[in-house]
Amino acid sequence: MNPNPNPNLVTDRATFVTHLECSMTGERYEADMLHGLSRVGRPLLVRYDLDAVRGNLPRGMLAARPTDLWRWRELLPVRQTADIVSLGEIETPLIPLEGSALGGDVLVKDEGRLPTGSFKARGLVMAVAMAKELGVTRIAMPTNGNAGAALAAYATRAGIETIVFCPADTPEINVREIAMQGAHVWRVNGLIDDCGAIVGRGAAEGRWFDFSTLKEPYRIEGKKTMGLELAAQLGWTLPDAIFYPTGGGTGLIGMWKAFDELEALGWIGPARPRMYAVQAAGCAPIVKAYEDGVEHAERWEDAHTIAAGIRVPRAVGDFLILRAVRASDGRALAVTDEEIGAAVKDAALRDGLLLCPEGGATLAAYRRARGQGLVGEGDRCVLFNCATGLKYPMPPADQALDKDAPIDFDAL
């Protein structure tokens, strides 16, 4: 049976991984071996022979391929086509905001169109494919919801046993989704880093491989396809600013890496978007570190927000997020739950687009940036909506009709 359900997937492309590299020290690690963090406890980055990629992949050849995630095969780490695990990872659309963006040039990259309804599919499809390729049979991960759902789907498809730990207040729809797709799911009385501590202890005892954010090298490679897609969709230019909902920050780090790789290929120039790391006021460790002028963020105590996906008290890749934000002349911004809720409502009522709370946070942050003069009306800005709004509670309709009662059609 073909493990790949995507009929458009080309199966005979070379891969160009040369080695892995510690993101802090630059120490090299051998490719094609199972790795977690580096020796100094920092994320590993996958490196490619980009000169060879440039010689084997003219940009025009890429343009002729189907627009799915796997069109970028030469810039992805999976060596063996048989190890690819796919549920149909499409290129997600850019949706203009016309009413809720206050007249600005704003596009929403709607990641809710991906399998399992969130951008977590990008990272987890790559991480699971590499786990399969490297012989992993049992994995565990902490989640606030959507990552666990994506992991469960892909790992089940790959035949890998999965254990997922989530905070006790994780939305019921996410918990059921994870369980329905074959993972063992446990609620934990704590936050996501408390769940991560359980995963870490089990990994240290040899019970499973730790799939926590950035504690394996390949989720970044899947998430970087957001940046690759964005460049291609905008005609090999980049926007003036990107607003990204930031918990663990894998996508922001991945996009920044993607832009460097595209420049090395000669497909884009040196200009970069201003990167805005968006957090909730109730959990804003990256914002505090940015404002304090430091490279590492302290754990945020008493973390709380309606945007559970960015309720991450501590991020192992904090310094990579902050470096990208500062190098791009961007900012780390915190918005309140009230601002998030208002933005979600406005996008639905004015633009017909259902944002998840984390996506609402990016719209709220964009509005704040406009108000502070950080972005102008003519700046092209991209906001990331990281999951479908259909997964989240919505207010009930406030009107009902009795079929047997007289109908006042003029009042309808």
Image (cartoon, rainbow, N blue to C red):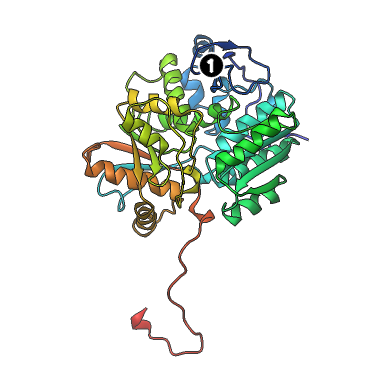
- From the image, which quarter does the C terminus lie in? bottom left
Spot occupied by residue 409 in the image (x, y as percentages of width and height):
38, 83
Can the viewer see residue 4 in this picture?
no
Spot occupied by residue 137 in the image (x, y as percentages of width and height):
76, 31
Residue marked by disc 1 = 22
Looking at the image, residue 17 sits to the left or right of residue 209; the answer is: left
- Circle 1 crowding by C-alpha within 10 Å: few under 14, some 14–19, many from 20: many
Pick the front one: 377 or 148: 148
Pick the front one: 264 or 175: 175
- Say which residue appears at 71% left-offset and 24% top-offset: 133
Q: Secondary structure at mark 1?
A: strand
- Say which residue appears at 71% left-offset and 23% top-offset: 134
Can the viewer see residue 310 in this picture?
yes
- Say which residue appears at 51% left-offset and 21% top-offset: 61
- Say which residue appears at 39% left-offset and 56% top-offset: 341
Spot occupied by residue 381 in the image (x, y as percentages of width and height):
32, 38
